[in-house]
């Protein structure tokens, strides 16, 4: 029953300290993330420290993530592109084959970002391919639209088609979650069926849509109409999501992206995450039961 592992995200710089505290709860994978830069983090040493805890439990590092803007390289994102390169080079030390993050974005519409996207990720895809590494783009809009935004172009399926045409490499794909599509009122289930072959990692994050508010006030009114949720508290049918992934032969992980739920937050953060962990395990089918021997 562990062909799809259920894990969680952990800040890269604190991973060696946090992971030993999380393992007893039953998490089966860990996704290490960095915000805008890996900085001076000694990645090879971090890999050794992390694997001292994970290897003895057979727990993989599912992805290494860097979330900034590698297309402009301005301001706090000045080191983001170099950080992609560092993580690609260090992934093997973590026993990891996937580096993930935002695509980045140049000022203007998504169309105007494509040339730069092709230049940057064409080279990164080659670097990754030579090391047996895949690149996955998270589908968060970060407040952007088709016409404008500062962080990420990989939040709409039309953009995905353009991206994969610009860099037609088998080792680039998506770090997908239903939440970010639901925020845009996109039904994630048919999208998953269509794009499952390009999904390299799944973020375990859901959403709750208040359709009564949408119908009364619309999406541009004063009332909030959608909330990010920990799995088990949102609207998605994760049994269907896991079934679609399995039917397509997906054998990666679903890593819970916490710290967003409006209810299970603060002192209830890990209460919510562990509930989400156990909920997703039940959606996966529960504990393995062997068949009778004839």
Image: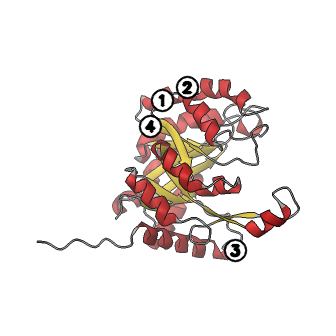
**Circle 3 residue:** 263
Measure how far apart labels 2 and 1 are at the Cα level: 8 Å
- Quadrant containing the C terminus is bottom left
Count of picture labels: 4
- The numbered mark, 3 or 1, whose residue comes first in the sequence reads 1
Q: Which residue is farthest right?
A: 222
Rendered location of residue 197, percent (x, y): 45, 43
Q: Is residue 178 left or right of residue 226?
A: left
Measure how far apart labels 2 and 4 are at the Cα level: 14 Å
- Circle 3 packing at 10 Å, graded few (<14), some (14-19), many (20+), is few
Question: Residue at 51% of width from left, 58% of height from top?
Answer: 255
**Circle 1 residue:** 169
Q: Is residue 183 left or right of residue 48?
A: right
- The numbered mark, 2 or 3, whose residue comes first in the sequence reads 2
Q: Quadrant of residue 159?
A: top right
Tell me the SS state at disc 1: loop
Measure how far apart labels 2 and 3 are at the Cα level: 41 Å
- Nearer the camera: disc 2 or disc 1: 1
- The numbered mark, 2 or 4, whose residue comes first in the sequence reads 2
Measure how far apart labels 1 and 4 are at the Cα level: 12 Å
**Cβ atoms under marks 3 and 1 closer than 8 Å:** no
**Cβ atoms under marks 2 and 1 closer than 8 Å:** yes
Tell me the SS state at disc 4: loop
Question: Residue at 66% of width from left, 34% of height from top?
Answer: 70
**Circle 4 residue:** 133
Tell me the SS state at disc 3: loop
Of the numbered discs in the image, which one, if any, rests on residue 122?
A: 2
Q: Which residue is farthest left?
A: 294
- Nearer the camera: disc 4 or disc 3: 3
């Amino acid at each position: 029953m562990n062909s799809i592992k259920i894990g969680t995200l952990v800040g890269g710089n604190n991973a060696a300290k946090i992971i030993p505290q999380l393992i007893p709860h039953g998490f089966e994978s860990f996704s290490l993330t960095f915000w805008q830069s890996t900085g001076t983090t000694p990645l090879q040493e971090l890999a050794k420290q992390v694997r001292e805890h994970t290897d003895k439990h057979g727990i993989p590092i599912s992805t290494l993530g860097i979330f900034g803007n590698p297309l402009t390289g301005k301001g706090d994102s000045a080191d983001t592109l170099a950080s992609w390169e560092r993580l690609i080079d260090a992934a093997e030390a973590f026993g990891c084959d996937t580096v993930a993050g935002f695509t980045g974005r140049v000022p203007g519409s998504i169309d105007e970002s494509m040339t730069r996207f092709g230049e940057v990720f064409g080279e990164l895809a080659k670097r990754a391919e030579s090391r047996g590494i895949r690149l996955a783009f998270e589908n968060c809009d970060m407040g952007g639209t088709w016409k404008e935004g500062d962080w990420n172009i990989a939040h709409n399926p039309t953009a995905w088609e353009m991206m994969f045409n610009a860099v037609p490499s088998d080792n680039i794909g998506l770090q997908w979650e239903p939440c970010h599509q639901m925020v845009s009122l996109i039904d994630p289930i048919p999208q998953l069926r269509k794009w499952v072959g390009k999904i390299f990692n799944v973020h375990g994050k859901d959403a709750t849509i208040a359709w009564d508010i949408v119908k009364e006030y619309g999406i541009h009114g004063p009332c909030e109409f959608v909330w990010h949720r920990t799995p088990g508290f949102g609207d998605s049918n994760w049994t269907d999501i896991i079934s679609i992934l399995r039917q397509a032969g997906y054998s990666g992980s679903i890593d819970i992206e916490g710290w967003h739920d409006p209810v299970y937050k603060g002192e209830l953060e890990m209460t919510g995450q562990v509930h989400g962990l156990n909920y997703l395990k039940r959606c996966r089918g529960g504990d393995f039961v062997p068949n009778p021997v004839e």
